[in-house]
Amino acid sequence: MAVKKVVIHNKSDKPDNIVEKETEIYAECEALEKELPKFLRGFFVYLKGNVLPMTRLAYLHDLKFFFTYLLNETGLTEADDIRDIKLSELDRVRAADVNLFIDYARKYKVETDDAVYYYENNNKTLARKKSSVSVMFKQLYRDELLSKNITDGFDPIRVPKAGEHEIKALQDDEVMIMLDAVTNGTGLTKHEHDFWEKTKKRDKAILVTFLTYGLRLSELEQLNVSSFNFNRGEFKIYRKRGKESIMPLNDSVTMVIKDYLNNERASDDRIPSEADKDALFLSLQGKRMTGRQIRELVKKYTSIGMKTAREDGYSPHKLRATAATSLIGRGNSIYDVAALLDHEQVTTTQLYARQKNNVKRDLVHNMEWEKERREGENILRSDDDDQ
């Protein structure tokens, strides 16, 4: 059967690539819904109207995992396919069964014909899976499809509170080492250097844009050439929740973006797909860079900045943290930084404040035992020489 061509008639103000991405998420959600039991149709309507598209998608993935567990790992259903699980069978599920599911999700294996895959989840992921299942059970109970609300019996999952984690971000000197690497090719392997020769202006534009605005990966990935109005000194991005935001350009970002556009980016005749001709950041194949490609790029250069192995490099989100901590460290208002980063709550931005980090650093620097010991030895030697 031939695959049908997808044609999008975009009558909105959003760029085609943004609408395309939203349509992909929508289609993926619809495909997952068809794999799940039919009695969830009302719940699907609830999700569509009450949560963000990516959250809806995550919930549906979690629910497919839950129903697959019921099918393959328990005797709670007689169905051969998760679509055939009956509402009456779900109504017999108890809180203890869900707690066993959460415990199973901590570490489980999936066997295929040629391999055995082991999966391990941390508490944050387990908490999200528990939340997905809880929302479903609560909504089905509200809709009077289930006889009991069993969610009160779900075991709590300890997730570190905001602020309990150390904020991982580059220090200013590490940023400078990283920017030197992307500018001059220092710290790269020979293989990496060969690629760098072809992409150095693009790579630098990506890093400087991340560092200046603290953009999310999806926001940078979706940038277009037409997003930029250099005459007005601004560019447009699309935030979570589909919110449009105008960002001011500074001299550094203007310089690196223009340098990339004028001296490295492929011309339209070398871009195979019409859909990619407006994409700002292109791969060597002339296609819009994927999130994975951008993530690997950032990991490589941050590892050079921190002088660690490539696998220990930072993600784009850590560059978002770097932008936040650097701005706050330079004395900027937390409220202004929250507006720049699109934080709904200023308490999120406060987590990036560097006072605690600075206190630790100052305390440790004031306890230089070996340094003081050597200085003491030098003083004694000096006194002996004088005598």
Image (cartoon, rainbow, N blue to C red):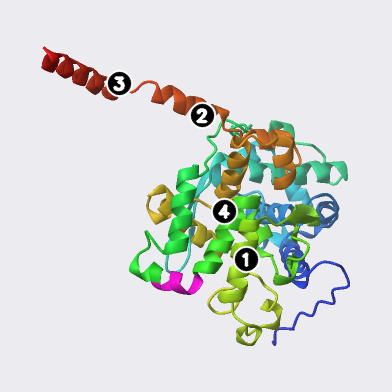
> Where's residue 63, x and y in %?
69, 53
Q: Quadrant of the N terminus?
A: bottom right
C-alpha gap between disc 2 and disc 4: 23 Å
Residue type at mark 4?
Answer: Pro
Which residues make up the magenta segment? 194-199
Residue type at mark 3?
Answer: Trp
Foreground residue among 112 and 363: 363
Residue type at mark 2?
Answer: Asn
> Residue at coordinates 30% horizontally, 21% vertically from top-left?
369
C-alpha gap between disc 4 and disc 1: 18 Å
* Element marked by disc 4: helix
Q: In this view, does 238 lie to the left or right of 162?
A: right
Which residue corresponds to mark 4? 316
Which residue corresponds to mark 3? 369
Q: Is residue 317 left or right of residue 278?
A: left
Which residue corresponds to mark 1? 257
Which residue corresponds to mark 2? 358
Q: Nearer the viewer, mark 4 or mark 3?
A: 3
Q: From the viewer's perspective, is residue 68 above or below residue 381?
A: below
Query: As drawn, which residue projects farthest toward the top?
Result: 387
Residue type at mark 1?
Answer: Ile
> Residue at coordinates 50% horizontally, 43% vertically from top-left?
172
**Residue 342 in view (yes/no):** no
